[in-house]
Amino acid sequence: MENRIPPFLLRPPAEPTGRGKGRVRVSFVDRGVRHAAKVVSDGYIQWELASREGLLQKIDARVKLLFLLSFVVIVSLKREIGAEAALGGFIFLLAAATRVPFAGYCRRVFFFGFLFGFLVALPSSLNVITPGRIILPLLTFPEAYEAGAYHLSWHLPRQIGITEEGMRGVLLLTLRVVNSLALSFLVLFTTPLPEIMRALKVLKVPDVFIVMLTVSYKYVFLFAQTVEEMYRAKKSRLAGGVKSSAGREWVAGRMAFLFRKTQMRCEDVYKAMLGRGFSDEIRISGFRRLSSRDRMAGAAFAVAGILFLLL
């Protein structure tokens, strides 16, 4: 039988000859849409993690919220690096026993802790802000400088560097941020959002705050998914690449479109809520009583909190 397949389909694909040492160039639009898609996927992953069989997943949401609030207060009260490190070790051991993806959990906690803890507090380690013994000299001037205006004086020392006292403060603040983030992510990863909202209602949190938090959490994922779908629709109609200027124009146009759509969606949602009899008060029903396991977990958390306070 004669072969009727065209010759160009039988030839192997040619090797790419572009520059960049084999790297594929990804536009900023692709990266942005990829991050938007990751927001959506992380939201669904949170629901999946919260429904797993684990140590904290079986505990009532009210107990976990009280655990979160009490330990955040304890983290903010401790003023010793050793005590903060011990608190962090306890939290991470609890996360490892709860069957959350430990590598991703640690990556998130330490990234945000480094960003909002260490980098923010690092300038305070200089002797210009925190006097003390210099352990890392950075700059040396010929002489010290004095400046003042409107009855305010400022002294610039001859040598500028990182002090031991300042570095202790930076490490303490970083550990506080890391521990607070670890607690928050641990509770979020092990508790479904409806259970958190119901527990907040039981703990007498204002209804306005609960409604805003619920609607915002839901529509962040909805609009992230909308951005991803719009970009896929645009890309499916293209035969080649897109210039950076055209990509920026498309991003600006989509931002304006999403802003208008958000306003329209908010009005539609509010009208639908009013049409279904929504009032300012949130009512919950079917909240089960605390089981013996919940009471034991609450007692264990209380004992651990007292021990860390005395540490």
Image (cartoon, helix red, strand yellow):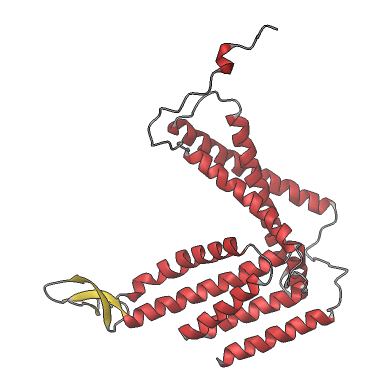
Q: From the viewer's perspective, is 122 left or right of 135?
A: right
> In the figure, residue 71 lies in which quadrant?
bottom right
**Residue shown at 62%/67% (left/top)?**
185
Of all residues, the one furthest to the left in this rendering is 142
The N terminus: image quadrant: top right
- The residue sitting at 40% across, 29% down in the picture is 18
Q: How many callouts does the rendering have?
A: 0
**x, y (%) of residue 143?**
12, 75
Residue, far right: 286
Q: Is residue 149 visible?
A: no
Residue 156: x and y in percent read 21, 75
In front of the other: 155 or 67: 67
Q: Position of residue 133 (x, y in %)?
A: 27, 84
Left or right: where 224 falls relative to 112: right
Residue reaching furthest bottom?
Answer: 310
- The part of the image, by quadrant, that contains residue 227 is top right
Pick out the residue farthest to the top.
2
Residue placed most toward the observer, 77 or 154 = 77
Of the 4 image quadrants, the one containing the C terminus is bottom right
Q: Residue 258, percent across and down?
A: 61, 42
Q: Nearer the viewer, residue 235 or 128?
A: 235
Image quarter of residue 207: bottom right
Q: Residue drawn at (77%, 84%), measured in percent from left and top?
A: 296
Q: Which residue is drawn at the image coordinates 63% and 90% (left, top)?
A: 306
Asked if residue 74 can be seen in this view, the reply is yes
Which is nearer the eye, 97 or 170? 97
Q: Is residue 139 left or right of residue 261?
A: left
